[in-house]
Amino acid sequence: MKRPDWAVPLGTAVGLAAICAGAWIEGVRLGFLWQPAAALIVFGGTTGAILVRRGIEGLRAILRALVSLFFEPGRDELEATKARLTWLARLVRREGPQALEAQAAATTDPLIAQALSLISQYADAAVVRERLERVLDHEDERGLRDVTTLEGAASYAPTFGILGAVLGLIQVLRALADPSSLGLGIATAFVATIYGVGVANLILFPLAARLRERHSNYMRQREAIAEALISLAAHETPSAITRKFVADIDLALRKDRAVIG
């Protein structure tokens, strides 16, 4: 079971609390910042822009990626992969590469399935490397697509905030006959700008950056798995494959901690 990662909700809560405290210190009533029309324009417009860019499936993919940020990546899968690679190396030593054909059909991981299928056909290690690099490139491109879409949403939100402010000012100009309401009307109009800028810089851009870091770490781990599979194609010993995999994973985790730190 994955452990929850409280950094995202905690950071968002701290940012919101700081903004609300600053507004209160400046004498702004917090209730005044709640404007349903402004929220509808910013959030609805940004969601619509994402749908135009990626479609419904793309929106679902982004939501799944965002949900994953609320949980820490576990080491259980890596330990299971290490054990499986060691077992596969022993299987090849014992029964030959053709024994991997059934394992390739049974696995749901496209990287492992591609490698095992090639090894079962006695493919050279260089051929296996070339095919796995293609799979990794596809996975990298697919993961970065969610990141760039989220970064795009962060750029859309302030624009829709400005749109909401312009619509509010249009309403203010219609009430020029009542000068007493102009100040309140103008202040209300700019709440949409606050929504757009706040959502972009407090939520969307930070989430995109965190998702990019998580994806980079994931790709380093996938590269470590690919290198172990290439070693399997080169008929290295089970112990050598395990040592190389553990060393590559440890290096990937150290790089990830250095980036976060």
Image (cartoon, grey):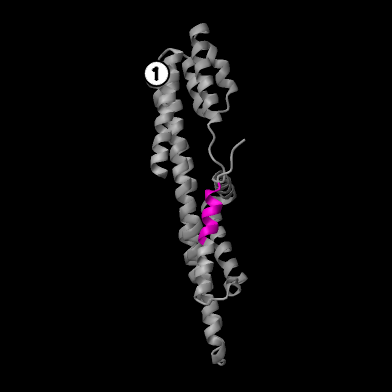
- By secondary structure, the bulk of the magenta-drawn segment is best described as helix
* Quarter of the rendering containing residue 224: top left
Q: Residue 106's x, y, as percent?
A: 60, 22
Residue 112 vs 198, above or below: the answer is above
Mark 1 residue type: Ala
Residue indicated by mark 1: 125
Residue 92 vs 76, above or below: the answer is above
Q: Nearer the viewer, residue 243 or 157?
A: 243
Residue 128 seen in the figure: no
Residue 91 vs 117, above or below: the answer is above
159 lies left or right of 4: left
In the image, which residues are magenta?
6-15
- Which residue appears at 56% of the width and 58% of the height? 47
- Which residue appears at 50% of the width and 73% of the height? 25
Q: Residue 239's x, y, as percent?
A: 44, 14
Q: Residue 183's x, y, as percent?
A: 52, 85
* Other residues around mark 1 within 10 Å, as few (<14) / some (14–19) / many (≥20): some
Q: In the image, is residue 10 part of the stretch drawn in magenta?
A: yes
* Quarter of the rendering containing residue 130: top left
Residue 122 vs 45, above or below: the answer is above
